[in-house]
Structures are given as structure tokens and as C-alpha cells.
Image (cartoon, rainbow, N blue to C red):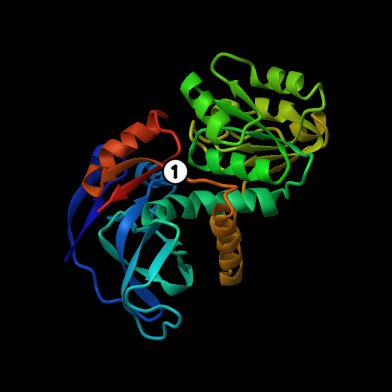
Amino acid sequence: MTKAIRIYAQGAPEVMSFEDVTLPPPGSGEVRVRHHAIGVNYLDVYFRKGLYPAPSLPFTPGNEGAGQVVSVGEGVRGFKKGDRVAYVSTLGSYSEERNVPAAALVPIPDVISYATAAAMMLKGLTAHYLLRRTYRVKPGDIILNHAAAGGVGLILGQWANALGATVIGTVGSEEKAKLAKKKGGCHHVINYRTENFAERVAQITKGEKCHVVYDGVGKDTFPMSLDCLRPLGMFVSYGSASGPIDAFNINLLSQKGSLFATRPTLFTYIAKRNDLLRAAREMFEMMEEGYVKIPVHAKAKLSEAADVHRALESRATTGATVLIP
């Protein structure tokens, strides 16, 4: 037996229960991992509420974690009992132990703690694909980073800064503005609750505007985000913290400068193991060289997951939060 969060009906945080579950031995190609830390992401809220459908009910939420290998299933090569590993994978990480496909695991360098690893897999790999593959940021680019004090935003801003970009961040409070400026790599920070961010972007860039907008907020920042782009710029919608973007007239893209728009997801970019390993390696290198720091801003017990979700949905959190079994 092991303990896990279970959801029997999608809805408010109260639908999450902490209970005993039976975990079978790892199957062919699987590895059993004892979690030392579990990453918390807004993606977890989407699944809990039903915005993203779970494969079945009941289910255990969560897509990332870090811990030690307990045992390996048939056919697994490259992992053994006691190895330090982290992953971003299918649902099931809100648990003391779970079985994970070996293809989703990456070894953790000794200098990276379990809590940091659990906080960085989904968010760090998201920052990687956004900056290196969806739009390949280069020196001299100007980017707009929405939710710059959030989990992805803090990593993305630091990384973009290291790549030589000018980073403009948006936040929702003065406290978050200080964090984005001090630890999030932002050269300029806009409080979108008190300022018109499109007007401020135009002022900051002297009318040139941005090469790319990275938007994990959604409804509250669209379509004004399009007004922050120069002709042929790219709008990248990778999350919906304020709610999903409604259907829009695609002619807006031509009217505002022949813009590009995309809605990517991490799992498409790491579907091939070689892509996952390369992205993880580049992410670890950025951390080991000191360009990107991923502080864990809050830790909570696994049994307190409902309280963590309430804080996340109120947009009161900054940076990374992890659950400790």
C-alpha cells in the first residue's frame, strides 16, 4: 500500500482525498519511484476541474516528481535501485510511490536537490521548448514574458536573459514585480493591473514592439498581447491561468501585422526520448553554469494538496511549489 491523492469527481479543491492505494509491481518498461518531492503546476488544476479530461475516474493528479528508484520492471535498462531520477509523465505523481515509464525518466545530477528537480521538470522543460524550439530566441530579440513571477515565468526570463534577449515581464502585484526584476531576468516589469501593458511595451521598445510574446495567462491578456508584437511576430499561448482564450477571428493576425500564433504543449516536444534527454541536458547545464536558478518558494505536505491548489488558483503563489510525501 502507498498513500496518494485521489479524485473521484472533477471540481473544486475539496474533491481531492488523501487515501491508501494499492500499487502493483512495475510492469514491463516501468520503474517504481519513491517520491522525495512532487512538482505542483497549474496543469494539475486543469485536470482537477475537468478543463483537461482525465483518462478515467478516479485518478491521481500530477505530472512531475523526483525521487529514488525502488525497483525496475522487465526490459528496463539504464536504471537500478537507488538511482536519483526525475520525470514529467502521465498523471499520477501526487503519491508517495508510483510506477513510471522508464522512457520518461532522466537521471538527476548530484548537485541538484530532489525538491529543485521536482520543481523544474515540467516548468524548466517548458521554458526550454518555448525558447529553443517554438521560437528560437537569439541575442537582440525583445520578448514579452507574461506571469513573469510564476513558475515558468521565472525560469523563462532568466534563460532568455542569458540568451541575450531583452526581457519585458508582466505581473499582477508590486511584490511580484520585485521578484521578476530581482530573480526573473526581467529588464523591464509591467504591472498589468495598474498599467496598460500594450502601451507600456510600445513605450519601452520605442514603438518597435516584441519579436515574441510568451503567454501562460490566457483570457485576461488576449487579444491585447497581439498589440505587443511587431510585424511577423509570434504569439505563443502555452497556458490559461485566467481561463482559456475564446475563439477569435483569425483575420486579426493579418490586421495586426501578418502575425504567427501557436498553442504548443510540452509533451509533443518530448515525445521522442532523444528530445527529452537533450532538453533535460541543456536545462541542467544552464543551472550548473549559474544562468538559471530555480528556487522552491513553498513546500507543503502531500496531504495538504487541496490548500496548495486554493493558493495556486487565487494566483497568490510565486515561483515553484512542491509537495513532500
Q: Position of residue 129 (x, y in %)?
A: 62, 53
Q: Quadrant of residue 92?
A: bottom left
Q: Residues within 10 Å of mark 1 (few under 14, many from 20)?
A: some
Q: Is residue 313 above or below residue 286?
A: above
Q: Is residue 23 visible?
A: yes
Determine the residue positioned at 42% across, 71% down. 101
Percent across and percent down for residue 189 are 61, 25
| 207 horizontally vs 67: left or right | right
Q: Is residue 165 left or right of residue 41?
A: right
Give the amino acid at mark 1: Pro
Q: How many marks?
A: 1
SS at mark 1 in the image: loop
The residue wearing badge 1 is: 295
Quarter the N terminus occupies: bottom left
Relative to 159, say whether 269 is above or below. Answer: below
Nearest the viewer among 57 and 100 is 100
97 up-or-down from 132: above or below:
below
At a point 27% along the width and 64% down the height, the residue shown is: 97
Residue at 64% in and 48% down:
130
* Residue 242 x/y as whole percent: 49, 31
